[in-house]
Image (spheres, rainbow, N blue to C red):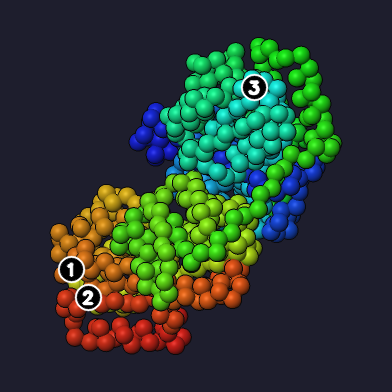
Amino acid sequence: MKTQWRLSPSILVMLGALAFAGVACGGGDADEPAAPATTAVPAATAAPAATAAPATDSGPLKVAIVAPSASDDLAFSQSMVDSVNALEREVELSITDGTFIVEDAAAAIRGYAEDGNDVVIAHGTQFGASLIEIAPDFPDVTFVWGTASDTQGLDNVFAYAPAADEGGYVNGSIAAALTETGVIGVVGPIEAGDAVAYINGFEAAAIAGGASEVNITYTGSFGDVALAAEAAEAHMANNADVLTGTAQMVVGAVGVAADAGVPWFGTQANQTSLAPDLVVASQVYHWEVILEEILDLRDSGVLGGQAFEINLANGGLVIEFNDAFDLPAGVREAAEAMIEDITNGTIDTTATAAPATDSGPLKVAIVAPSASDDLAFSQSMVDSVNALEREVELSITDGTFIVEDAAAAIRGYAEDGNDVVIAHGTQFGASLIEIAPDFPDVTFVWGTASDTQGLDNVFAYAPAADEGGYVNGSIAAALTETGVIGVVGPIEAGDAVAYINGFEAAAIAGGASEVNITYTGSFGDVALAAEAAEAHMANNADVLTGTAQMVVGAVGVAADAGVPWFGTQANQTSLAPDLVVASQVYHWEVILEEILDLRDSGVLGGQAFEINLANGGLVIEFNDAFDLPAGVREAAEAMIEDITNGTIDTGS
């Protein structure tokens, strides 16, 4: 097998220190009943399977893996690498690991598709929003995504998930037979996906087996080894004499267990090598079971549209015992009998829990990807909630550029009894698919997105950003003397693309000779935005615009050079009071008021909303300190009226 490697940009920067830092282990809903033993299950929203035959290739099948943590993490990422290496066919394997930042993963996924890979495995729940954008651009490429329980309607995407509660149940039953104090400690990452499923199954069996306490600690991180070690130490200080845990950070907990001579139970990969005398057994993910079926389907011309589960029955989950650990007489035999009972359906390993209710005043929480005062995307939502005409108790978690941090915050706010949780980032959609069904009484508000993914307690929202872009572009055309305008964009997605396309169309229509666009590949890198602005001015641009929270760097460069700037998302005048011409400002409160009215009437979700110039959700806020040429503002205001009444179509 030929294996190639690509290092993610983040790993190049943080080499070594973040070797185990990763993101979502992902997985099916922990509160869902376990799927039957059959391998393939219908995808909830899958489109009919593609019938066109895949492109032929005379060489080995080209397969790429994009994984959130190190490929030798003895956990989630390694489980997939080992599984591809175990395939019974020749493949040329490429790997990009350590993509704990979703944008890095998206770039790698797209790059592998562009490079002609036949199959691209997006091994992380958090990569779903990226796939929704990328997969349709490559209809001949098969994307394999997990952990996830449906394909999001994409007919060249297969989804996969583990019934992790099954192995958790087996491990928990053995742990109950080993504990002498009756206290067992569990070290979990973020309370989501297969981590929750494994832990719930483990806890249920341990209690049923006679343990008096199963103490669970979620560290809030998939990759923080030190936090995992601290959690293990705390459990032992509380009299725990058996430990388990899940995710790539458990290497820290296993080390603590080994030093103290405490037995450990592993999951995802075989962790015996971390403590050869103390790892009792590991639930190992053998994804090759469903990968073989997926590749057979691809050979027959089916490129996606189905969801798969690995479980004990189909051999995708295997309890691998450590023969060096001396189990009490009869314990292994009882565990093997339990595996048989789970396989044939005699034992149900799933656990259910009713969502918490809250009868207090309306509580609203915002989870946002950047700083709440970024003068861009995140601030637009904070300002909008503060502008609501009703009293709310507002909580904010900002700076969650790592999706797993956002997922933990979203789930935490729901558990804490918030009535409305605003997930203010397209990339949070995959997390909501897992979280929202667990809290049917909570309204989740998600954007920017144009549909609710079939979730009846989720509202979606998006801006018609091309409209304000069109207005700004028309004004920019009236200001440029060189005829060259520069645009600084983040990642080519969402409202950024809409704004830029609208701006470009109007600027060219207004007489600009060139509109040069740079996508930096980052929403938050201020330095890259500054470099892009400098490059535009070196290319003779005398007017600039841009979008996303990183534009503070570009505005600073424009201000130093005396170049006019056009803003979007929030009013950016304060960044350059003499040079910001106008800003398209998002007034989300227009649709938030409607959403809250619907919630008051008992409708908790299931609808999508748009802010635009017509409904007042988008407003062009002029900077009166900037002296526009005669007639330009009046022409712009007339254009706003024409867009509002439909005379001008700004659609990009």
- Mark 2 secondary-structure assignment: loop
Earlier residue among tags 1 and 2: 1
Q: Decide which of tag 1 and tag 3 comes sooner along the chain.
A: 3
Q: Amino acid at mark 3?
A: Thr
Q: Secondary structure at mark 3?
A: loop
Determine whether, in the image, residue 391 is placed left or right of residue 53. Answer: left
Compared across the picture, whether 324 is left or right of 315 comes to left
Tell me the crowding category of disc 1: few under 14, some 14 to 19, or many 20 or more residues within 10 angstroms, Cα based. Answer: some
The local secondary structure at tag 1 comes to loop
For the N terminus, give its image quadrant. top right
Foreground residue among 131 and 524: 524
Which three-letter amino acid code belongs to the residue tagged 2?
A: Asn
As measured in the structure, the alpha-carbon distance from the residue carrying label 1 to the one carrying label 2 is 8 Å
For label 1, the residue is: 577
Instruction: Mark 1 and mark 2 in contact? Answer it, CB < 8 Å.
Output: yes
Q: Are marks 2 and 3 in contact (CB under 8 Å)?
A: no
Label disc, if present, on residue 623 of the rendered structure:
2
The residue where tag 3 is placed is 179
Where's residue 9, x and y in %?
39, 40
Structural distance between the alpha carbons of marks 1 and 3: 67 Å
- x%, y% of residue 563? 18, 65
